[in-house]
Image: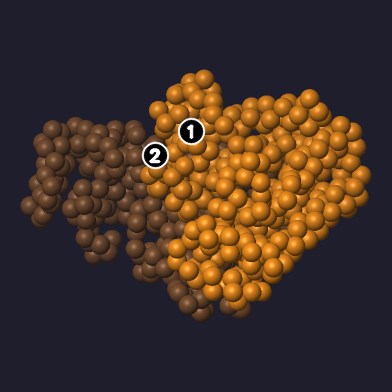
Chain colours: A orange, B brown
Amino acid sequence: MNELQQLSAQMRQAVNAEMKAVLHATDDTPNAFYGMMHYHMGWRDEQLQPADVNAGKQIRPVICLLACQAAGGDWQQAVPAAAAIELLHNFSLIHDDIEDASPTRRGRKTLWTIWGTEQAINAGDAMFALAHLAMNRLVDRGVSAETAVTALRRFDETCVRLTQGQHADMDFEQREVITVDEYLAMITGKTAVLVSLCTELGALIAGADSETVEHYAQFGLNLGLAFQVIDDILGIWGDEAVIGKSASTDILTKKKTLPVLYGLNHNGALRQLYEQEQTDEAFVKQAIQVLNTTGARDYAIERATYYSENALQHLEEAEPTGSAFTALNQLSDMLLQRDF
Amino acid sequence: MNELQQLSAQMRQAVNAEMKAVLHATDDTPNAFYGMMHYHMGWRDEQLQPADVNAGKQIRPVICLLACQAAGGDWQQAVPAAAAIELLHNFSLIHDDIEDASPTRRGRKTLWTIWGTEQAINAGDAMFALAHLAMNRLVDRGVSAETAVTALRRFDETCVRLTQGQHADMDFEQREVITVDEYLAMITGKTAVLVSLCTELGALIAGADSETVEHYAQFGLNLGLAFQVIDDILGIWGDEAVIGKSASTDILTKKKTLPVLYGLNHNGALRQLYEQEQTDEAFVKQAIQVLNTTGARDYAIERATYYSENALQHLEEAEPTGSAFTALNQLSDMLLQRDF
């Protein structure tokens, strides 16, 4: 096992124990109110019997704790913040699934399909409040009240930006023209600010000076942006065997990702093509050809490279130390060096 | 003007200014994201043009500020908490309106009917996050970080109880039998804990000792319970001219309020009557007669009196002072001494 695997295994265990404490998850069968949340977390099945299913990659809390340790702190002190971020992420998934009418998540029925939209909205609200109570537990681990208040302020400023990103994402579905800048602002809100919160809170709780905290925040922000843009590239040009889904799905569904938006904004032929109602293999082939000739792939790779380099430079300027630094580098490699 | 009218006018003005600062409401037309929230608050119309409509009674923030002043504090320091509670209340209204499929609120279209369920869920989430940012502004008014963290913990514990109350309320609609105790637990969550948070945070921010803070919390809790039970009584036996709606509505809609639940649990004849699909004037007359003979009215009045007396006793034991105390008494009289 490398540093990342070793550290992240310990960290995930601590974060899950913390989340269970906050959500009052014990061996006893939960009541209907907490049961819905335990189901969503993968701790219970539909009948609220014990379950242990895939709870997602939980990369965010690991990034938070690694940043804390690399910035000279004790990662155990940041566990409440890491748990809070993972609960915040899960709250947003509960509401996103309603808003997107998604029937499944991580191979299981979504909350709203089992208990109805009304109760699912409410369960999300409850998890949002509980995420804040997780943050509040920072003071129980010796974090100063001043730092806790600052951390909570950044937490909620990030929540506002997440909802702004979600607003933009839903708004885009109703619109014909979306600029590349609007798209980048949207993914900043929907994806990057949450990764930025992870690294920022880790460094803040470690007691790093404000300049270092800002470098960690920028490392996370650029890491999140790079990851999303790479995801967009792989959704069109990725190796199906590697990414595990048909690389042409994003074209078949006419998903407006960065390369597509670049193409639509620079090439009338692609705009005409995308007015077509039906999509098929010929459509995919033609679209990819136009994207290639328009320079959409090159543009997206340039963006991904820019964000990746920015991320790593800010990490370097933050002067991280120890095995957590090694692990952060391994994690960045894993997230950023995907073949395209 | 009496003390209550004088103080509450000043306080409402300060709370509204604070809420506008938190929600970035200026003279400029807001963007679509903030615009939805400004519409809900009554500051903008559907086209996001300036409006100034009924924003509700705003009794909760006034109670919070009066408690702060009566407990020896400076009410200006508690304004962020009062604004946060009012924003929290409004967030819950946005989601309640979706969950209850309510088309109107305060004589205007509800958010979801204009912008759709998806964006309305998201706007509620945003206001929830912003309510927390309002709380965070306590430290900008010289409240210590320790007190702010404690206040935030109580704030989120209350949020969890609110969602628990809402869960129970929606659950009751699916169930045949609801006990009086279950009902009282539900209204505690849906109504009373928020009033309790108002008085508790007011006293906490004033720097009162923990025993006094607890008396204020109990004052608010019992005030909220008494108010709700009195509302239930007036919904059946109230004077139509005074309460402004037909007193029999709660019977016609077979709403399960405290007197009705008491009756259903103590009288088979009422249970039989309530199995009837259609309701009319004869149904109302018969139901009220059974409720009277079963002692449902007496029971509800006994409960209302018990909570009212409890509230006033805790207020007395909190040893409040000054014109804010006088105003708190006037407010309690207004809320509790309604004819029944």
Query: Is label 2 in a helix, a strand or a loop?
Result: helix
The residue at the point 32 percent across, 55 percent down is B338
Name the residue that disc number 1 marks: A39
Q: Determine if residue A219 is in view.
A: yes
**Above or below, comparing residue B84 to residue B165 in the picture:** below
> What amino acid does circle 2 point to?
Ile
> What amino acid does circle 1 point to?
Tyr
**Above or below, comparing residue B63 to residue B6 in the picture:** above
Q: Are marks 1 and 2 on the same chain?
A: yes
Nearer-the-camera pick, A191 or B15:
A191
Residue B164 in picture, x, y percent from top left:
45, 40
Report how far apart the C-alphas of labels 1 and 2 lie in the structure: 10 Å
**Above or below, comparing residue A99 to residue B192 in the picture:** below
The residue at the point 91 percent across, 50 percent down is A317
* Residues marked 1 and 2 touching at CB (< 8 Å): yes
Residue B287 in picture, x, y percent from top left:
13, 45
The residue at the point 20 percent across, 36 percent down is B264
The residue at the point 92 percent across, 44 percent down is A319
Instruction: Tell me the quarter of the picture where residue A128 sits.
Output: top right
Residue A148 in picture, x, y percent from top left:
73, 43
Residue A301 in picture, x, y percent from top left:
75, 58
**Above or below, comparing residue A205 to residue B29 in the picture:** above
Sequence-wise first label, 1 or 2: 1
Name the residue that disc number 2 marks: A114
Query: Is label 1 in a helix, a strand or a loop?
Result: helix
Read off the chain for label 2. A
- Asked whether, in this view, residue B110 is left or right of residue A172, the answer is left
Read off the chain for label 1. A
Q: Residues within 10 Å of mark 1 (few under 14, many from 20)?
A: many
